[in-house]
């Protein structure tokens, strides 16, 4: 199990939770809000916004789509957060309906399909406004609590990791699987992943490895944890429930592999990462190697560079870099091809171009990081 040094800690969050008085106030206010798993799913609204006195609740309400985030949802959440911040609400809670997912990602299928519409601006609007929402969450003075119960991937990560607290359960499944669809871990992924312990973030980014249950907490993704099965009120979850979450007694399953992960994924290039994995007789290394070889070679190269650069950048700078990357990926081959193969036709057989790491030229890689016409404004 990782110790305190292994937690994902942003200096802003640490400063905000340092006051016991402030923490106790949050706990008292949270006692009136229940963690419900989906009895509002019949509501036609894709996002349900509620206020209970000076507390606010955001419910992601697309259970059949595993609460995948779309532009309509972003445009409802963003002004609500700004309004609640101005009204000095004492806390904001966000959760998902349906019992299976907090948010399984962004609705990338719609984005890719919109490319066939000459007048559509969805591919630019979605990423611009999503990243602006991610940044807004990071700047909120109002405590923002994400209940990441169930599947939490891609866009769902962006709705959670940049806020005050992330509360996971034994049902939480976390991943950034973008390289499998020819894309890059974004929504601030190039910022928070390099700041996980050791080279865990690089490993998660390149392989799309899925963290489950206790591993989400041990890896430092969630700040607190509760037992889902208890259906308890979340009063005191900032301390009490994390201590009593029985599933956290399970060790961090990647702990035995961290020396290998740190050694291999500290390599200066994707090629060297693969070389080090090949040189190992560890079955975990062989499994990891098999996974990486399924990914888009170009996405792997871009992801490696983006995380390396992101480790030295602010969140705002990372989001601006990710916006440039998103626009290049949408307009190129691998991202649409990955979405086709995994999400549309579901033949699980993407044809990557370039088809090998050797064919990924430095010139093309550099072009992805160049400024775009309409830069992201934060």
Image (tube, grey):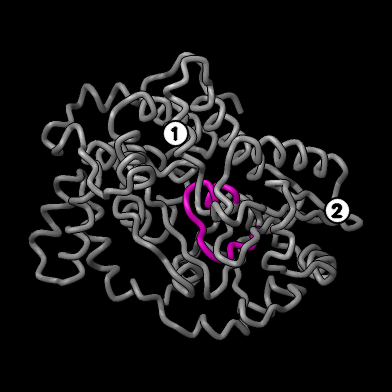
Q: Give coordinates of residue 152: x percent, y percent.
A: 51, 58
Instruction: Report whether 249 appears left or right of 34.
Output: left
Mark 1 residue crowding within 10 angstroms, few (<14) / some (14–19) / many (20+): many
Residue drawn at x 30%, y 50% is 206
User: What span is in magenta?
Assistant: 146-159
Circle 2 Cα neighbour tier, 10 Å, few/some/many (<14 / 14–19 / ≥20): few
Q: Is residue 133 left or right of residue 293?
A: right
Name which quarter of the figure residue 146 lies in: bottom right
Mark 2, residue position: 51
CA–CA distance between discs 2 and 1? Answer: 33 Å
Of tags 2 and 1, the one toward the viewer is: 2
Asked if residue 336 is positioned above or below residue 242 in the image, the reply reads above
Secondary structure at numbered mark 2: strand
Instruction: Classify residue 244 by image quadrant.
Output: bottom right
Which quadrant does the N terminus fall into?
bottom left
**Local secondary structure at mark 1:** helix
Q: Which residue is mark 1?
A: 322
Q: Position of residue 86 (x, y in %)?
A: 84, 39
Q: Is residue 36 above or below residue 208?
A: below
Q: Earlier in the sequence, mark 2 or mark 1?
A: 2
**Residue 347: x percent and y percent?**
27, 48
**Is 147 colored magenta in this rendering?**
yes
């Amino acid at each position: 199990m990782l110790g305190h040094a292994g937690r994902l800690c942003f200096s802003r969050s640490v400063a905000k939770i340092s006051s016991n008085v402030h923490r106790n106030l949050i706990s008292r206010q949270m006692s009136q809000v229940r963690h419900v798993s989906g009895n509002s799913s019949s509501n036609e609204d894709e996002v349900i916004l509620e206020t209970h006195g000076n507390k606010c609740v955001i419910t992601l309400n697309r259970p059949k789509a595993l609460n995948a985030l779309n532009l309509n949802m972003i445009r409802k959440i963003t002004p609500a957060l700004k309004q609640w911040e101005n009204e000095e609400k004492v806390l904001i809670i966000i959760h998902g309906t349906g019992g299976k997912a907090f948010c399984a990602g962004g609705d990338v299928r719609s984005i890719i399909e919109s490319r066939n519409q000459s007048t559509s601006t969805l591919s630019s609007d979605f990423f611009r406004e999503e990243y602006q929402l991610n940044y807004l969450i990071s700047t909120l003075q109002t405590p923002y609590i994400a209940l990441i119960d169930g599947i939490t991937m891609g866009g769902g990560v962006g709705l959670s990791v940049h806020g005050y607290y992330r509360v996971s359960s034994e049902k939480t499944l976390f991943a950034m699987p973008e390289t499998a669809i020819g894309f890059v871990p974004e929504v601030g992924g190039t910022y928070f992943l390099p700041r996980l312990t050791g080279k865990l973030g690089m490993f998660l980014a390149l392989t799309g490895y899925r963290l489950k249950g206790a591993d989400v907490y041990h890896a430092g993704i969630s700040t607190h944890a509760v037992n889902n099965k208890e259906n308890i009120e979340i009063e005191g979850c900032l301390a009490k429930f994390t201590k009593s979450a029985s599933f956290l007694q399970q060790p961090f399953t990647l702990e035995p592999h961290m020396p290998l992960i740190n050694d291999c994924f500290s390599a200066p290039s994707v090629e060297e990462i693969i070389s080090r994995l090949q040189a190992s007789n560890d079955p975990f290394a062989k499994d990891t190697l098999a996974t990486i070889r399924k990914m888009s070679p170009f996405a792997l190269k871009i992801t490696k560079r983006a995380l390396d650069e992101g480790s030295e950048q602010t969140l705002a700078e990372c989001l601006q870099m990710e916006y440039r990357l998103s626009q290049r990926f949408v307009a190129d081959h691998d991202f649409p091809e990955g979405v086709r193969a995994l999400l549309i036709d579901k033949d699980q057989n993407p044809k990557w171009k370039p088809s090998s790491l050797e064919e990924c030229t430095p010139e093309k890689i550099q072009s992805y990081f160049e400024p775009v016409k309409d830069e992201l404004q934060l």
